[in-house]
Image: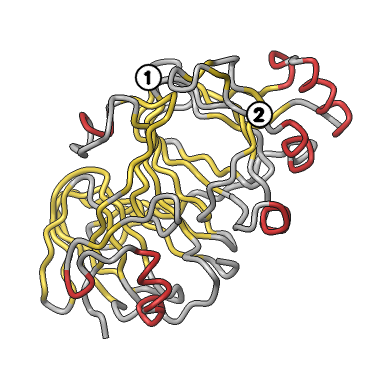
Amino acid sequence: MLMEPLFLKPAFQEKIWGGKRLKTQFGYDIPSDHTGECWAISAHKHGPATVVNGIYKGKKLNQLWDEHREIFGNAEGEVFPLLTKILDAQSELSVQVHPDDAYAWKHEHELGKTECWYVLAADKNSKMIYGHHAKTRKQLEEMINEGDWEHLLRHVPVKAGDFLYVPSGTIHAIGRGIMVLETQQSSDTTYRVYDFDRVDKKTGKKRELHIQQSIAVTNVPHVDPQLNIKTVKHEDAAVTTFVQTDFFSVYKWKISDGKATFKRQEAPYTLISVLSGTGELVISNQKYSLEKGQHLILPFDVKEWTLTGTLEIIASEPGERA
């Protein structure tokens, strides 16, 4: 039995659009001032996180998935299904779209990518590209090929605390000056539709676009998913349920100088990211300090835990299709 949490050291990804707020806001030791992504809870081969405590200290998360599946309730699947990131968009991300599982397995040999964003910070008047205005796939293709981005792309304003669900097939881009915590399927497949004609200073070239794949996988017409976001009081915590899908469920736990005990219902494990504050996690009378920027997994054998202090946490659990 593993009755202790798995605290993780993230992996980091430099990006053309990245900044330095992962250092200034979270205190991470980032590789450069153009660090775009913190892969906080990751077993993906392009950036696995490392366990920093307990009997598995030094192990990569993908190793644990392969070698100690009992930690995760003997869940099925070739790969650990979820990936938690923090993204810092110093400038706009490319306009992009992700495939679903069927297309991704066939063409990319990995999971598709449904994701969601909890907005951590956003400059004044910040906007996301979220969806499009094409009515048919033929119209989508024509507008992309003509570069008619003004009429094709749909912009939505966002602020800190907002939540957006981004199913596979949704054209999207995180806007300049926005930081998000992203919960997604564990996939690194991205099809770029448009990249603002940027040139990568490292290569001196524009980044690759994936026009045909993008047209093939985009949902037409775009329809906003209907979310039933709700917040309930649980002891001294405010518990917000953002989304519950076949891929994942995502929650926010907010405790203000208080205490709350949680019990896992059906999921085999729970992912936790501490967004702000300090406090303690208590499991079977064993205490673990929590602070902003920490990421951890509560394994299968941890069925109940208590949080104390002042904490804001995003938690997620795998869905039935994970």
Q: Which residue is mark 2?
A: 209
- Residue at 62% across / 53% down in the picture? 112
In the image shown, does 271 or 207 lie closer to the viewer? 207
Mark nearest the camera among 1 and 2 is 2
Q: Is residue 81 above or below residue 90?
A: below
Tell me which amino acid carries mark 1.
Asp
In the image shown, does 194 or 140 lie closer to the viewer? 194
- Check disc 1 and report its element: helix, strand or loop: loop
Side of 113 relative to 91 (left or right):
right
Toward the bottom, the furthest residue is: 1
Asked where in the image residue 282 lies, by quadrant, the reply is: bottom left
Tell me which amino acid carries mark 2.
Leu
- Check disc 2 and report its element: helix, strand or loop: loop
- Residue at 45% across / 56% down in the picture? 44
Report x, y in % for residue 240: 40, 52
Q: Is residue 105 above or below residue 268?
A: above
Q: Which residue is mark 1?
A: 123
Q: Quadrant of the C terminus?
A: bottom right
Q: Quadrant of the N terminus?
A: bottom left
Side of 137 relative to 188 (left or right):
right
- Residue at 47% across / 58% down in the picture? 82
Badge 2 local density, few (<14 within 10 Å), some, or many (20+)?
A: some
Earlier in the chain: of badge 1 and badge 2, it is 1
Badge 1 local density, few (<14 within 10 Å), some, or many (20+)?
A: some
Report x, y in % for residue 232: 38, 56
Real-space Cα separation, disc 1 to disc 2, in angstroms = 28 Å
Asked where in the image residue 23 lies, by quadrant, the reply is: top left
